[in-house]
Amino acid sequence: MSGAERVIYMDNNATTMVAPEVLAAMLPYFSELYGNPSSMHNFGGQVGRAVRAAREQIAALINAEPEEIIFTSCGTESDSTAILAALQAQPGKRHIVTTRVEHPAVKNLCRGLDTLTGHKHRVTELPVESDGTLDLQRYEDSLEDETAIVSVMWANNETGVIFPIEEMAKIARNRGILFHTDAVQAVGKIPIDLSAVPVDFLSLSGHKLHAPKGIGVLYVRKRTPFVPFLIGGHQEHGRRGGTENVASIIGLGKACELATRHITKENTTVRALRDKLEKGLLEKIPNSLLNGHKTQRLPNTANVSFEYVEGEAILLHMDRFGICASSGSACTSGSLEPSHVLRAMGVPFTAAHGSIRFSLSVYNNEDEVDFVLTKMPGIIANLREMSPFWQGK
Amino acid sequence: MWEYSDKVKEHFLNPRNVGEIENPDGVGEVGSLSCGDALKLTFKLDEAKQKIIDAKFKTFGCASAIASSSALTEMIKGLDLEEAARITNEDIADYLGSLPKEKMHCSVMGREALEAAIANYRGVALPMAEGELVCECFGVTDLEIKRAVEESNLRTVEEVTNFTKAGGGCGKCQERIQELINEVRKTGKPKIIPMSGPKRLTNIQKIKLIEDVFEREVRPTLKKDGGDVELLDVDGDFVIVSLRGSCASCAKSQTTLKEYIEKKLREQVLDTLIVEESRL
């Protein structure tokens, strides 16, 4: 539907642009450097060395050891691998603690475990407060001797709300319970130091931090019990079979190096742009409200609801101006119900259907934010004019 | 991203007939905020009360809901009520080129609003709202599901969800939906009370609708006071009843007859009905 001359991309929690430096680093591995990193000859060996360097770049971003990095195909594979490994490694334990606002990669896996494994599991999905945060006491109370693993996202993809993973992982550690965090949205946006945060597993995904789609990482802390998900060759020390996706691994390494450099910018420049956008929207548009905790949030994400209008219609009007964002509305997802995250937070239907998520990156600038701020009030007013619920407001 | 036809995009971006007609002849409101889409349709008839001369809409919903509403208002202008009443959701979808299958419920919402508006003008009750509530999430009854299955030749639960939304929430009712599909496909035509105006209500249909109102509302109310009512006959607009129990001897029986029973029937069946007590 877009006939816009330029694209203003504010949907970076969905996926990101591959950074030019990342693409440049990858290209030789599609052409002249096609060797197999496992080969004995130097032609392959040089590729093996490049993979090793990438592994070090990735480990550096999260302050982990290179041998704790397992390459996977995506965040979803990392999530599945971690949770299934924990269950298989502890056959007597069949209880899982997670939250109501997890990404489908965790939520649907946990809900489908009985069918998948043929064993009965109990899953505790922790509720969230209206600002999207968790009650720590409730979390602590949910842990049992039978709990095999806790799986809680580091930051929420829809609202950007950050969970206190350090504290939560420590509590689990004290109880001898394995802890997994889906950090797909957090890595590269906020500093992560795994020497201080005792998680056992962490998932990350390349395409959320300016690497390509199709590459993910599962961090597995040393000495954590592990069972592979993909069984095959000796790659990844036998923890994940399959010939390495070399070019993407190199790309992810480069992207992590860039993220290490950009992390300050994410939390200053990007945050300031996000704040300007958010404040502007809330001021200029009546009956708009912020979803999620005001400060305990990723610096790039603003989830704003515009009451009495529907998200898909908003997005398609934005699209005419080349503005890209997402919505938690039912109509955009192919399901008929609005976002499970917003519903878990108790966001009323008047607002949930009209929620728009803006997610920025270091490639956005103030001109773009200003442009969005000039266009949004008209779009919302136009749709409200048409809405039977807006009368007399 | 949905693949919308050019006509859907065009009607979404430049919707026709947005707004509300003042002093409309018919008003139809369907959907709700919680369902994610809602439509308020108003129309105006010509002096002779034959043809629709103007129609406007207000819609809360996605692009296809807005486009379906806009299309609907264009389609019904100039039609007489009988013609308008025959418009199906498929007609709306065809007018727009096509709709993604997951969005067919938007065209169904258009048809439902039109039916509601015509029923509102005619002062009759909509039969679809009655029946057993199957989908609690979206408030869809068995009659609505059966009708969609029959009219659009639906075969799977997923198709029913696409057309009516039923089963698209918690999913608890999906088994029941499958049963309804089986029922309709086995027996052929579902038994559905046709949407019709005063001219087309046969005596049998009137009796059926009156009995329904009696069973559902009137008799339970009267029984609270130890009374009861029985339908004896329907002759044109005359509804002959017999009051029973305490009503029979009640000094206020004429008030009950006119102020309560007649009023209910006029609201829900036909606004020309006259209720009389049997003199036998």
Image (cartoon, rainbow, N blue to C red):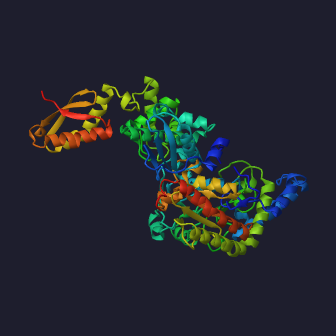
Report the label total.
Answer: 0
Q: Is residue A97 visible?
A: no
Seen in the image, is A132 located left or right of residue B125? right
Q: Is residue B48 visible?
A: yes
Residue A279, percent across and down?
60, 72
Q: As rendered, which of A15 and B58 lies closer to the eye?
A: B58
Residue A347, percent across and down?
48, 61
Residue at horizontal 63 percent and vertical 37 percent from the top: B97
Q: In the rendered view, would you say A205 is above or below B18?
A: below
Q: As rendered, which of A300 and B107 lies closer to the eye?
A: B107
Q: As rendered, which of A83 and A347 lies closer to the eye?
A: A347
Furthest residue in direction top, as rendered: B187
Residue at horizontal 40 percent and vertical 30 percent from the top: B194
Q: In the rendered view, would you say A283 is above or below B151?
A: below
Q: In the rendered view, would you say B145 is above or below A173?
A: above
Seen in the image, is A121 located left or right of residue A258? left
Residue B14, percent across and down?
63, 49
Task: Give residue A363's quadrant in the image.
Answer: bottom right
Residue A266, percent across and down?
70, 71
Residue at horizontal 64 percent and vertical 55 percent from the top: A317
Residue at horizontal 59 percent and vertical 69 percent from the top: A284
Seen in the image, is A359 located left or right of residue A135? right
